[in-house]
Amino acid sequence: MTGQVSLWKKEIYAMIFSIIYYIWMEFIMMRIKFVLLMLLVLSLTACGGGGAKVQTTTSNTTMGQELMDLNDSYKKGILTEKEYKNAKENIMDRYDN
């Protein structure tokens, strides 16, 4: 009789252990699913670039207009001769490309 009781206790302990193990594994799987879901959400929100605005500016001025404006600034004394020559070279280089 004692052998049967101890076998019975072992089976009950094994069942309790199985239930606890099952609950623990479900908990772990739930956490893994949550982490994967958060990674997915974060990766999808990062694809939008954070809502940054992209702006493009275009210039409608011609090289001649820029050179005339530069010459006016030089004649008014706003620019030194060195600044005038550097700016003139930059304008000409920009329109050559």
Image: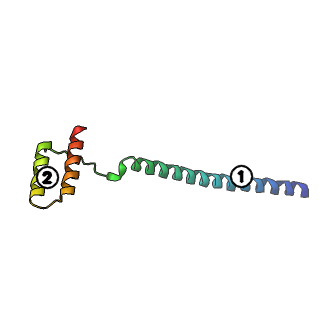
- Please state which of residues 18 and 28 is positioned toward the viewer in this rendering: 28
Residue tagged 1? 18
Instruction: Give the mark count.
Output: 2
Quarter of the image with the C terminus in it: top left
Task: Tell me the element at label 2.
Answer: helix
Look at 54% across and 49% down and name the residue there. Answer: 33
- Please state which of residues 26 and 28 is positioned toward the viewer in this rendering: 28
Q: Which mark is residue 54?
A: none
Does residue 4 show up? yes
Residue tagged 2? 70
Look at 9% across and 60% down and name the residue there. Answer: 76
Task: Please state if 16 lies on the left or on the right of 27 as rendered.
Answer: right
Specify the farthest residue to the bottom.
77
Depth-wise, is mark 1 or mark 2 nearer the camera?
Answer: 2
- Residue type at mark 1 is Ser
Task: Tell me the element at label 1.
Answer: helix
